[in-house]
Image: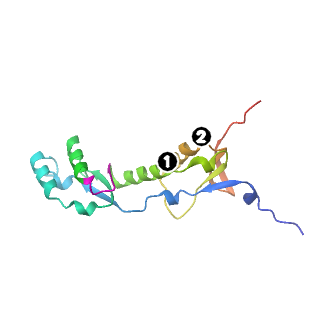
Amino acid sequence: METIVNKVAESGLITLDLAPYVHTDEVAVFDLKPFLFREMILKEKDYRAALQTYDWTQFEGKQVAVMCSVDAVIPVWAYMLAAAYLQPVATSVYYGTPEELAKILIQQHINDIDVTEYIDKRVVIKGCGDTPIPEAAYLAVTQHLRPVVKSLMYGEPCSTVPIYKKPTKIA
């Protein structure tokens, strides 16, 4: 009787699933649109008055994307004022859409990965799963791990696409 050998298990591959690095907490949005006169013009005096009476508690402990959902010229100081009010209550404040913020957050989580366990290892970045992973995450993990790994692949251990292989040193 022939013994079945699991070549994948014996290959020494480490699989890295990016799903745990996807930010799952709610991203709140602070939109400047309601503060605009006729959805076109920001009046400084009115804006300042509105910010003073605004209910900032809705952003408590949240990641906040600050944006304007209409095509209007917004002075830079308007975003700065919003950030000044948000900073004491929000976990963090970013400029951009919620989708852009999600990309920033996953990149930050990936950059926090301790690379020591991947030094000179053969790593497969998991390609399939139930959690949608933005393309930006795959770029971020490649940049983060490439300097330390022996090889980097994409897919599943049984079917990988080679991405990077450290050159062998010639003596």
With 57 as the anchor, is 136 left or right in this view?
right
Residue 91 falls inside the magenta stretch:
yes
Inspect the image, locate mark 2, and give the three-letter code of the amino acid beneath it: Pro
- Separation of disc 1 and disc 2 at Cα? 13 Å
Q: Position of residue 121 (x, y in %)?
A: 67, 48
Label 2 packing within 10 angstroms: few (<14), some (14-19), many (20+): some
Q: Which numbered circle lies on residue 111?
A: 1
- What is the number of callouts on the image? 2
**Type of residue at label 1?**
Asn
Q: Is residue 170 magenta?
A: no
Residues in magenta, as a range: 86-95
Give the quarter of the image for residue 171: top right
Element under disc 1 = helix
Residue 76 placement, left or right of 96: left
> Which is more N-terminal, label 2 or label 1?
1
Q: Badge 2 is on which residue? A: 147
* Residue 73 visible to an observer of this rendering: no
Quadrant placement of the N terminus = bottom right
Is 151 situated above or below 169? below
Residue 26 visible at all: yes
Residue extending farthest to the bottom is 1
- Residue 37: mark in rendering: none
Taking 17 as reference, is 85 left or right? left
